[in-house]
Image (cartoon, helix red, strand yellow):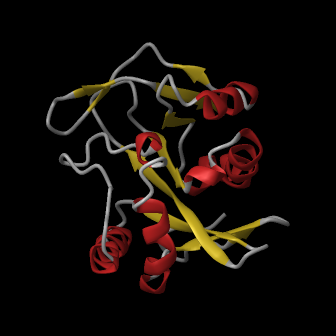
Amino acid sequence: MQNVFVKCPVIENERYLLRLVEESDAKDLLKVYSDKRALPFFNSDNCNGTNFYLQTEEKMVSYIQFWLRDYANRIHVRFAIVDKSIDEVIGTIELLHRKANDFFNNCCLLRLDVRADYENTADIRNLLSLVLDKVYDMFNCAMITTKAPNYAIDRIAVLKDMGFELSEEYLVGHNKRVYDGYWIKRK
């Protein structure tokens, strides 16, 4: 697979399409990032205190612009998740190749943010199955990690079923803060 930062792939199955986020996604994504029921499932670890609760389309556009700048600088890719059955963006998947001085060095960090009505085992499984096998090649890594808080029962069930294990290690942020609740899957 070619470098994700040279040309962002479009990945799809019968239900979902993943593509690089666009400013025109702001209206749909505001439904995700203003959803108080979805907010507890977002991983904002190491994001300088941001919790990703957004209330205006203008603020959503500014976040999308930030994600696109990070993509242009080869920091991470933020895919928009399009539900093809309703032709709406229902969330994002962020992928980044993490380089750090902790256990999570040289791994791919996956953040999955979806509307609350998609936070269920069937949709989480379908979405993760789209990218998991591709991540190792896209980011030249041997491990994938993602956060799932202990109350994310459906997400945890899917992670276990897909071969993830809860890590006993802490992720150390750039500010030296430690974070727990990370699940890992090795190649």
**Image coordinates for residue 100, horizontal then vertical, percent:** 29, 36
Q: Which residue lies furthest to the left in this view?
A: 175
Number of numbered discs overlaid on the protein picture: 0
Q: Is residue 3 visible?
A: no
* Quadrant in the rendering for residue 120: top right
Which is more toward the observer, 87 or 170?
A: 87
Q: Residue at x 40, y 30 (%)?
A: 104
Q: Is 161 on the left or on the right of 115, as rendered? A: right
Viewport quadrant of the C terminus = top right
Q: Which residue lies furthest to the top in this view?
A: 168
Viewport quadrant of the N terminus = bottom right
**Image coordinates for residue 32, horizontal then vertical, percent:** 48, 62
Q: Residue furthest right?
A: 14
Q: Is 6 on the left or on the right of 88, as rendered? A: left
Relative to 176, is 125 above or below? Answer: below
**Image coordinates for residue 46, horizontal then vertical, percent:** 26, 42
Which is more toward the observer, 38 or 89?
A: 38
Q: Residue at x 49, y 74 (%)?
A: 21
Relative to 177, is 41 above or below? Answer: below
Q: Can residue 117 be seen in this view?
A: yes
Q: Which residue is drawn at 40% across and 61% down?
A: 34
Which is more toward the observer, 131 or 44?
A: 44
Q: Is 135 on the left or on the right of 181, as rendered? A: right
Q: Which residue lies furthest to the front in this view?
A: 36
**Image coordinates for residue 161, horizontal then vertical, percent:** 75, 27
Q: Which residue is drawn at 67% across and 53% down?
A: 131
* Quadrant in the rendering for residue 16: bottom right
* Quadrant in the rendering for residue 53: bottom left
Relative to 177, is 31 above or below? Answer: below
